Image (cartoon, rainbow, N blue to C red):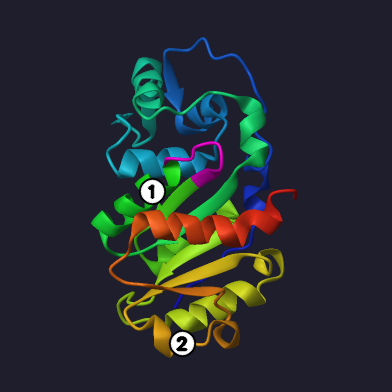
């Protein structure tokens, strides 16, 4: 079952200040400040092997700034600090790596609108809910051995996540009644990333001024 961690111990990441980076080797937190994204986003880029990184003897990730600059250039991600406050945070929880990547790519075509993080299981999803504080969660109903509608209900029941929108990916969307299950929208599998991006925008429009 999904465990939603308390957000109190991660508040230090909520307000990332802009600063000039002259270092050639960055920690994940320094890279996040450099890009004006959440540290969890940097870790997701590394885990998905989109962003090059290496580990110190102590097991800590480090990133060459030249690799980070090249990644931002290749993905047309602007380094504009003001943009971060306007972006909506989307968390994708899905065990299927290819599905996570396809959905992420679809959303990140609009880098001015979205900041995206991913989780491969419910445990990691619980950590990312507390750290990333998403505006919307895209959740695959077919997470192994889990009642995902109960997960959606738990998300909505958590005081600091009560306004989070939930899109459930399912093979049987016509059989579901979203509001009754704490789900804002059921979306059909196989996923059309472009249509999912449109539905994400529809749900998040009311949040753009927050």
Q: Residue at x 28, y 68 (%)?
A: 190
**Kind of element beneath mark 1:** helix
What residue span does the magenta drawing correspond to? 109-115
Number of labelled discs?
2
Front-lying residue, 10 or 198: 198
- From where the camera sits, is residue 127 visible? no
Outermost residue toward the right? 210
Front-lying residue, 166 or 30: 166
Q: Residue at x 26, y 62 (%)?
A: 96
Instruction: Name the magenta segment's main secondary structure.
Output: loop
Q: Answer above or below: position of 142 versus 7.
A: below
Q: Answer above or below: position of 205 versus 148.
A: above
Q: Residue at x 52, y 32 (%)?
A: 32
**Kind of element beneath mark 2:** loop
Residue denoted by label 2:
176
- Which percent across, then down, holds residue 133? 60, 55
Q: Earlier in the sequence, mark 1 or mark 2?
A: 1
Residue 192's disc number? none
- Which percent across, then down, holds residue 87? 60, 42
Q: CA distance from mark 1 to mark 2?
A: 25 Å
- Which percent across, then down, holds residue 172? 35, 84
- From where the camera sits, is residue 82 visible? yes
Q: Answer above or below: position of 60 versus 128.
A: above
Is residue 206 inside the magenta stretch?
no
Is residue 110 inside the magenta stretch?
yes
The answer to whether marks 1 and 2 mark residues whose Cβ atoms lie closer than 8 Å is no
The quarter of the picture where the N terminus appears is bottom left
Local packing at callout 1 (Cα closer than 10 Å; few below 14, some 14-19, many 20+) is some
Residue denoted by label 1:
106
């Amino acid at each position: 079952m999904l465990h939603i961690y308390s957000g109190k111990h991660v508040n230090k990441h909520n307000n990332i200040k802009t600063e000039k980076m002259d270092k050639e080797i960055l920690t994940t937190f320094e890279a996040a400040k450099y890009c004006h994204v959440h540290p969890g986003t940097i870790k997701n880029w590394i885990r998905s092997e989109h962003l090059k990184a290496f580990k110190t003897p102590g097991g800590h990730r480090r990133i060459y700034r030249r690799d980070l600059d090249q990644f931002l250039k290749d993905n047309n991600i602007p380094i504009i600090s003001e943009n971060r406050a306007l972006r909506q945070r989307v968390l994708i929880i899905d065990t299927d790596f290819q599905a996570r990547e396809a959905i992420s790519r679809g959303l990140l075509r609009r880098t001015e609108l979205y900041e995206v993080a991913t989780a491969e299981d419910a445990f990691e999803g619980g950590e990312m809910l507390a750290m990333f504080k998403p505006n919307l969660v895209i959740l695959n109903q077919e997470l192994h051995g889990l009642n995902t509608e109960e997960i959606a209900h738990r998300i909505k029941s958590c005081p600091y996540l009560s306004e989070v929108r939930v899109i459930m990916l399912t093979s049987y969307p016509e059989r579901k009644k979203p509001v009754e299950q704490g789900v804002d929208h059921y979306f059909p599998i196989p996923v059309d990333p472009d249509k999912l991006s449109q539905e994400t925008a529809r749900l998040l429009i009311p949040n753009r001024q927050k």
